[in-house]
Amino acid sequence: MSKRDYYEVLGVSKDADEKDIKKAYRREAMKHHPDRNPDDPAAEGKFKEATEAYDVLMDSRKRSAYDQYGHAGVEQGMGGGGGFGGENFSDIFGDVFGDIFGGGGGRGRGGPQRGSDLRYTLDISLENAVKGTTVEIRVPSLSSCDACDGSGAKAGTSATTCGTCGGAGQVRMQQGFFQVQQACPACRGRGKTITDPCGTCRGQGRVEKTKTLSVKVPPGVDTGDRIRLSGEGEAGPEGGPPGDLFVQMSVRQHPIFERDGKNLYCEVPITFVDAALGGDLDVPTLDGRVKLKIPPETQTGKLFRLRGKGVKPVRGGGVGDLLCRVVVETPVKLNKEQRALLEELRSTLGEGGKSQSPRQTSWFEGVKSFFDELKP
């Protein structure tokens, strides 16, 4: 019986790269695996056919011979009987499916693992965020045990090689038609066992401690910005390197200023007399008080820009501005004399007509036009 074209078996083109071939083999192998098709006697043959095609097309030498001479070019190198060129079948399958079963064929255990990263949320004032500061923080974390120097074994003793996996940290398991490697259940992938554990950390090699760290906050940070302190995270198991500590900024709400990027905003209440006649006001900034000149006939909502009184961003760029929004405040608790003066002012303002209250006049004209349009 003639063999099918290997490219056809995997459903790939002749110029397919290794990534496409591996992806196609994964698809075909999962589709025709005997364990997933117990009632289909042809599944095993298709599965072996796909594996054979994968073995040839993933080997540059075999693939070149196959492209030039077809099946005859690779029969001799494969022993003429459809074998796998002396390679272990589980190694081929594990190379493709290692991410599913926790490791490919022939791979030993990794070294000591890196510790986990930690996050600390630092609440700071707007002033400190804009100008920068240095803050001391206390961080609880898992640190290397001093009593056993992180080994987990009692002082004077040491961990021994695991008798189940021989120190590899992994064991081969038969799963149906194929073999895969998985973490050794006896040592949990460590490759070593502790017969006499440390009394301080109980064999874990790490203990919980609270450490005090000094954090330098650069000028211009904002909520959400992070400062990375390398090596200040949790200690790694089995003496592995520590993780990092990420200090995340959270700027508290300010009673006067509101920040938007590099600009600051604030509301400035003024009397209607200052709004009408104009005047000078003391306005707060993060650097102190400054004079703000209010021109006559200023309306509520007017924005005044104080250049360079905002924030210099931490990532660079020019200093922002302070934008002051004036709000005209209506006086309250008037005495008789003040009320009389205002009554007199109202009567005189009425004589001015449209010229002295343009917005009010325009609004009322708009209302009148609206109701006129509603009339039948």
Image (cartoon, grey):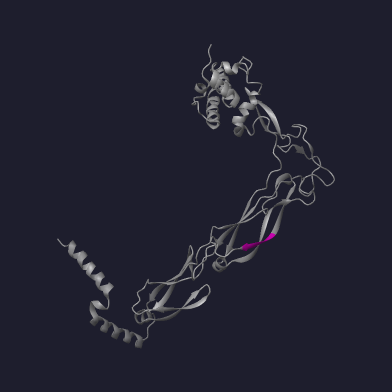
Q: Was residue 205 drawn as part of the magenta stretch in this picture?
A: no
Single out the residue that lies furthest toward the left. 376
- Classify 79 as above or below 222: above
Q: Was residue 213 drawn as part of the magenta stretch in this picture?
A: yes
Single out the residue that lies furthest toward the right. 156
Q: Position of residue 78 (x, y in %)?
A: 62, 18
Q: Main secondary structure of the magenta part?
A: strand
Q: Residue at x 66, y 24 (%)?
A: 88
Q: Position of residue 270 (x, y in %)?
A: 40, 78
Q: Position of residue 250 (x, y in %)?
A: 55, 61
Asked if one can make out residue 37 in the rendered structure from this viewpoint, the answer is no
Left or right, residue 169 beside residue 19? right
Residue numbers of the magenta segment: 212-216
Q: Nearer the viewer, residue 361 or 355?
A: 355
Single out the residue that lies furthest toward the top. 1
Q: Residue at x 70, y 30 (%)?
A: 171
Which quadrant of the figure has residue 188? top right
- Classify 3 as above or below 140: above
- Classify 104 as above or below 234: above
Q: Nearer the viewer, residue 254 or 282?
A: 282
Single out the residue that lies furthest toward the bottom. 337
Q: Residue at x 81, y 42 (%)?
A: 158
**Figure quadrant of the C terminus:** bottom left
